[in-house]
Amino acid sequence: MTYYNRYFATLYDLIACMTAAVDLLDVRVANHHQRVAFMSLKLGEQMGLPVEERRTLVQAALLHDIGALTLSERLQLITGEATEPEGHARIGARFLEDFPLLRREAEIVRFHHVPWRNGAGGMHHGAKVPLLSHMLHLADRAVVQIRPDMGVISQIGAIREAVAAQRGEVFVPETVDAFLAISMQEALWLELADEPRIHDFMDELSLDAVKLTLDEVVKLTDVFAHIIDFRSPFTTRHSASVAATAEKLAELSGFSENECKMMRIAGNLHDLGKLAIPSEILEKRSKLDPDEFDIIRGHTFYTYRLLRPIRGFETINQWASYHHERLSGNGYPFHLKADSLPLGSRIMAVADIFTAVTEDRPYRKGMSVSKTEALLRDMARHGAISPDLVSLLLAHHQEISHLREEAADQAGKQYDRLFLQDCV
């Protein structure tokens, strides 16, 4: 498999994928990022922003709450009950600033809860606050006032009054003026209530303008792996470890350099669907009950559905999403058998099992080398996973374990940097 094109995917496609993933957590937060992006777009149009600025604002809006990793925190932000709303903005910015092409968006996200305070909000802790942050702040606060239990047109007057009342103290006056100009249109509110998709404005915003090379996709999905895993201290190292293990197994299996990079991407994203799983299930210290396990079993389907729209990700999607399928057909959620499982998917299954059983989890300690080997050989003997790949992994156990531990250590340091920085 050879890729002759310089570019592998668009930045927007990957942002939209992550946006959809973090909004899967609960129906009460569903489509929130898309709605805020739509309102931000309309504000940007009214204020005459050039297309590059509008695109940056929309991309920041699509990612603005990624630092809020639990459902309770997301709900508090939407209801206005968050006691420290800037915390998730700092975390989200730290995620994004690790990817060079999103550093402007990171800056916007960092300050999107800073009030204007009659001009004092132009600076925050010695840093200049971008106007786009203030625009995002207004868009976010206007959207969260929409109540789902009554018709949206009936709410227009009250929302307009609430925003107007905060002119100068909370919101920049010119952003309030722009909001009041566009918010008279019933069509805008009906669009918001009808779950707008920024994809519909792709040509207008030139959303395809920023294209990523394969190496850039690797780096961005390294960031996404942290967003997936850092919801719980028990999973902070998992995706990075799986990606490192799978990438090495792919290399040992004869995959090309580009295919090995694709395998790392698949490893980074294989648990993307777990963003739809409540934290209390992920962190449960006792055995899951049948209903909870059924919820867990849905995560690979969500990974599949989330990756499916990304152009050029067809192979990566198979490798990532089929990691709980088994050669015998007894896996989930598609119950695919050996003849439907490509080698990349088989590699991911072995890498995921190897990593999962050697990690500490809330309900057990990681397995020893001997117990891990016995488990893998037993699963291979019973037709669940590939005997050849198990033999390959065990033949290179020391090297692969070193790479896995190195990746886990790096992820742990990143977790500490993101979450402990404010405590020192």
Image: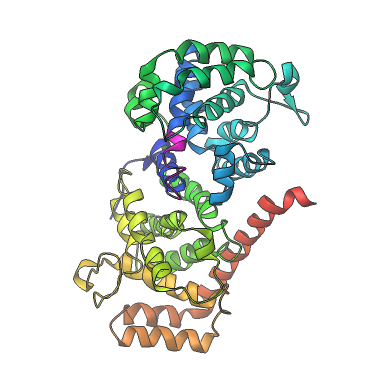
Location of the N terminus by quadrant is: bottom left
- Residue 40 visible within the image: yes
Principal secondary structure, stretch drawn in magenta: loop
Position above or below: 130 against 260? above
Front residue of this view, candidates 310 and 9: 310
Q: Residue at x 64, y 35 (%)?
A: 110
Residue 276 in the image, given as x and y percentages of width and height: 43, 54
Was residue 186 drawn as part of the magenta stretch in this picture? no
Residue 287 in the image, given as x and y percentages of width and height: 49, 77
Asked which quadrant contains residue 346, the reply is bottom left
The colour scheme used here is rainbow
- Which residues, given as a range, are shown in magenta? 25-34
Q: Residue at x 49, y 17 (%)?
A: 157
Q: Is residue 377 left or right of residue 64?
A: left
Q: Is residue 166 left or right of residue 241?
A: right
Asked which quadrant contains residue 194, the reply is top left
Q: How many marks?
A: 0
- Residue 69 visible within the image: no
Asked which quadrant contains residue 131, the reply is top right
Residue 212 in the image, given as x and y percentages of width and height: 42, 39
Judged from this view, the residue extending furthest toward the right is 424
Position above or below: 78 against 114? below
Residue 347 in the image, given as x and y percentages of width and height: 36, 69
